[in-house]
């Protein structure tokens, strides 16, 4: 488990699924807002996203999955749900930037 500090602390849980990786990224009121699966198909990186209505995590989940595949060279699924009551635009920016930085740190360490 990996913890990312920010205005809405985020937790990343990882699971090895055969050769592939599953990551569950949650913060605040944990839930499933979006999933993104990234994989290589004939040398091309493909990202498939499913975002639940009313949620906004899809683009960030896709970005995280893409980054992980590029570094880990395996299929990756990211399940994401982050919720902070009455989040301001600044709160959202802080969460996104913190998650990006923490994710890169975690994935880069895993890829060594």
Image (cartoon, grey):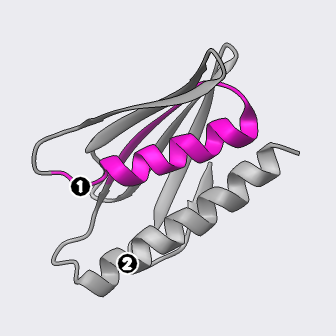
Please provide the residue range marked out in magenta: 55-81
Residue at the far left in the pictured view: 54
Give the SS element for disc 2: helix
Up-down: is 40 above or below 65?
above
Q: Which is more N-terminal, label 2 or label 1?
A: 1
Q: Residue at x 70, y 54 (%)?
A: 106
* Nearest to the observer: residue 17 or residue 57: 57
In 3D space, how far apart are the residues under numbered discs 1 and 2 (Cα atoms)? 13 Å
Q: Which quadrant of the rendered structure holds the C terminus?
A: top right
Horizontal and vertical percent position of residue 78: 47, 38
Is 28 on the left-hand or right-hand side of 107?
A: left
Horizontal and vertical percent position of residue 18: 67, 13
Image quarter for residue 95?
Answer: bottom left
Circle 2 residue: 93
* Nearest to the observer: residue 75 or residue 44: 44
Circle 1 residue: 56
Give the SS element for disc 1: loop
Up-down: is 87 above or below 51?
below
* Nearest to the observer: residue 46 or residue 76: 46
Is 112 on the left-hand or right-hand side of 29?
A: right
Horizontal and vertical percent position of residue 32: 28, 41
Residue 65 belongs to the span the image colors magenta? yes
Up-down: is 49 above or below 84?
above
Q: Residue at x 22, y 78 (%)?
A: 87
Horizontal and vertical percent position of residue 82: 32, 58
């Amino acid at each position: 488990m990996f913890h990312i500090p920010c205005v809405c602390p985020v937790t990343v849980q990882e699971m090895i699924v055969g050769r592939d990786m599953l990551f569950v990224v949650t913060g605040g009121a944990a839930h499933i807002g979006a999933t993104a699966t990234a994989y290589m198909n004939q040398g091309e990186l493909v990202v498939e996203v499913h975002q639940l209505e009313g949620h906004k995590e899809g683009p960030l989940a896709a970005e995280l999955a893409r980054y992980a595949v590029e570094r880990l060279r395996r299929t990756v699924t990211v399940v994401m749900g982050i919720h902070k009551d009455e989040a301001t635009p600044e709160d959202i920016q802080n969460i996104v930037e913190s998650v990006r930085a923490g994710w890169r740190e975690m994935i880069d360490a895993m890829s060594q």
